[in-house]
């Protein structure tokens, strides 16, 4: 009988991230991922404009990575909007791009040189804004 070569376990080349906002959609997706034993890292970008109740809830989430954005020297959306006299927009979503997506991508590019998949949980009510 020939001996079969023992296969070496490879490290996964994909890293999964959950863009966690503390709302119903991201919490539901986090719980689903945990239940199905998916390997992922939950990441919250603290842009400084979430409700105080959301900020308190975020503190209770285990194994949550918290990032602070740096957008043109601003670490919070409020001061950035005040300086440029603009408001966040659901239609253009420039604030999500500048303060969340870019922050996440910069962090991941530094940490890992692998394929990155970012998961975002949405409620059905938000689909019309996408």
Image (spheres, grey):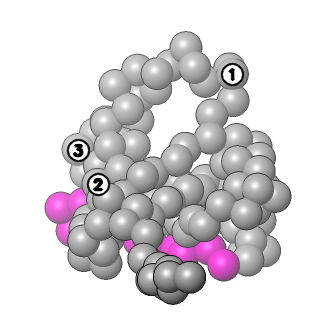
Q: Are marks 2 and 3 in contact (CB under 8 Å)?
A: no
- Residue 87 lies, in percent from the top left, at 38, 35
Q: Residue at x 55, y 68 (%)?
A: 41
Q: Residue at x 42, y 77 (%)?
A: 10
Of the pair 112 and 102, the residue shown nearer to us: 112
Q: Residue furthest top?
A: 128
Q: CA distance from mark 1 to mark 2?
A: 25 Å
- Label 1 secondary element: helix
* Residue 72 highlighted magenta (yes or no): yes
Which quadrant holds residue 86?
top left
Of the pair 44 and 1, the residue shown nearer to us: 1
- Residue 124 — which label? 1
**Which residue corresponds to mark 3?**
84
- Residue 61 — which label? none
Which quadrant holds residue 38?
bottom right
**Which residue corresponds to mark 2?**
102
Q: Is residue 113 above or below residue 26?
A: below
Residue range in magenta is 63-75
């Amino acid at each position: 009988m020939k001996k079969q070569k023992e296969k070496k376990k490879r490290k996964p080349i994909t890293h999964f991230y959950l863009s966690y906002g503390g709302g119903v959609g991201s919490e539901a997706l986090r719980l689903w991922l945990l239940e199905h034993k998916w390997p992922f890292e939950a990441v919250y970008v603290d842009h400084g404009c979430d409700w105080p109740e959301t900020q308190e809830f975020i503190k209770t989430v285990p194994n949550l990575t918290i990032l602070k954005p740096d957008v043109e020297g601003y670490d919070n959306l409020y001061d950035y909007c005040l300086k440029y006299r603009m408001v966040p927009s659901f239609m253009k979503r420039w604030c999500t791009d500048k303060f969340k997506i870019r922050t996440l991508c910069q962090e991941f590019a530094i940490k890992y040189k692998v394929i990155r998949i970012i998961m975002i949980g949405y409620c059905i009510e938000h689909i019309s804004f996408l």
